[in-house]
Image (cartoon, grey):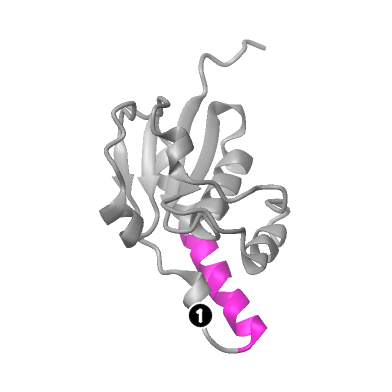
Amino acid sequence: MAESVGKQRVLFLCTHNSARSQMAEGLLRDLGGDRFEPFSAGTEATQVRPLAIRAMAELGIDISGQESKSLDRYLNQPFDAVITVCDQANEACPVFFGARERLHWSFPDPSEAEGSQEQRLEVYRQVRDAIRERIEEELLTRTLT
């Protein structure tokens, strides 16, 4: 079997790098196989939210070892795509001169969900599934330019 030519480097950005961007990184790592090298970061680093970890575990994807990172560490790195997954990060995102493509996917912040833990987890599931759908439709079906 032939080895893959370079992996497509994709950076997912969100404000706190605690839920949406973390789930996107885990999903692309799982769904994209050896075609992608996914990363995530935030305009400020915090911690990965436990409900994001639980929602991903339901799909058999373990993101418990991922850490919240600041986007500063990636500013001078080349990427095939930089994708903001929240409106605040899209507005605050610096120009990535090394990015071939810049995309914005707007998803609601699941950490703002209210109610019981089960009700809040359901919001994380909905956001997770919406992110998965965008990855399947927009990344897995094409080669980034």
As drawn, 87 above or below 25 = below
Crowdedness of circle 1 by 10 Å Cα count: few (<14), some, many (20+)? some
Q: Is residue 140 visible?
A: no
As drawn, 132 above or below 121 = above
Which residue ends up furthest to the bottom in the rendered image?
Answer: 115
Residue at image location 49% in from the left, 65% down from the top:
127
* Residue 29 or residue 76, whichever sits in front: 76
Question: Residue 18's quadrant in the figure?
Answer: bottom right
Residue 46, position as x, y percentages in the image: 55, 58
Q: Which residues are magenta?
A: 116-130
Magenta: main secondary structure equals helix
Name the residue type under label 1: Ala
Query: Does the stretch in magenta take in 118?
Result: yes
Residue 142, position as x, y percentages in the image: 40, 32
Residue 37, position as x, y percentages in the image: 55, 31
Q: Is residue 51 visible?
A: yes
Query: Does the stretch in magenta take in 37?
Result: no
Q: Which residue position holds label 1?
A: 113
Residue at image location 40% in from the left, 25% down from the top:
78
* Left or right for 25, reference 116: left
Residue at image location 63% in from the left, 88% down from the top:
116
Residue at image location 45% in from the left, 69% down from the top:
109
* Residue 143 or residue 10, whichever sits in front: 10
Residue 61, position as x, y percentages in the image: 69, 51
Count of numbered circles in the view: 1
